[in-house]
Image (cartoon, rainbow, N blue to C red):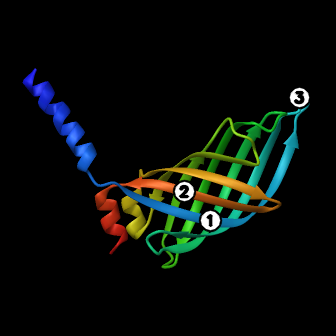
Amino acid sequence: MKKLLFCIFIFIFSNLYGKQYDLIFNFSGSYKKNEMKFLDGSRLSHNIYESEWTDNYGNYGTSYCLTSIKYNNNKIIIELDSYCRFKDQDGNIFTQYNTRTGHELNAGSGKAKIIEGQKKWKNLIGAECLYSIRYLDDRTYSIRKCQITESMHNMLIK
């Protein structure tokens, strides 16, 4: 029983006093859509997104995304799969995989995960992010918030 209480105490203490770091990306860009409408009114859309981004660590660059979206006749997303390739100011590349379901097509939120990277971005592989996106005509506006570890934070500030 003492060991269990000790473990609970350590867990609570580490969560209360442990440092949490966030990597926050801001995006704006454009997209092009190719769409197929099915007989039941649902649709399949293949989109290409191009955007510029900045983050809260002073990095900036461009991104390119290939996205496949299946949505019903009410424009509610059934399935979204997206891969985004980022290039930073130093020419280093990293890739995120994005997914979301159940939201309206014109705006929503989802999850992203860094799946590959070069140089400092290699240390962020596995970092998970939440994102939101909004559309205006052929423009997109998005923000991503990724929880990162202290070691990931230290690599970004070098």
Query: For residue 152, which quarter of the picture?
Result: bottom left
Instruction: Point out the tag, 3 or 2, that comes first from the N-terminus.
Output: 3
Residue at point 75%, 54% (across, down): 47
Q: How many marks?
A: 3
Helix, strand or loop under label 2: strand
- Left or right? Give the position of 158 relative to 95: left
Circle 1 SS class = strand
Residue with the mark numbered 1: 27
Residue appearing at x 80%, y 33% in the figure: 72
Going by the numbered disc 3, the residue's amino acid type is Asp
**Residue at the image position 42 percent from the left and 58 percent from the top:** 22
Height in image: 80 above or below 53? above
Q: Amino acid at mark 2?
A: Arg
**Left-right relation of 131 to 15:** right
Per the rendering, the mark at residue 144 is: 2
Secondary structure under tag 3 reads loop
Q: Position of residue 14 (x, y in %)?
A: 22, 45
Q: Quadrant of the C terminus?
A: bottom left
Sequence-first tag of 2 and 1: 1
Relative to 63, is 43 above or below?
above
Q: Position of residue 2 (x, y in %)?
A: 8, 25
x then y, percent, for residue 15: 27, 44
Task: Determine the CA span between mark 2 and mark 1.
Answer: 8 Å
Q: Nearer the viewer, residue 141 or 98?
A: 141
Residue 107 as seen in the image, left or right of residue 3: right
- Number of other residues with Cα within 10 Å of mark 3, as a class: few under 14, some 14 to 19, many 20 or more: few
Indicate the amino acid at tag 1.
Answer: Phe
The image quarter containing residue 120 is bottom left
| Label 3 with label 1: CB-CB less than 8 Å | no
Residue linked to disc 3: 40
Do labels 2 and 1 touch, CB within 8 Å?
yes
Where's residue 106, x and y in %?
A: 76, 48
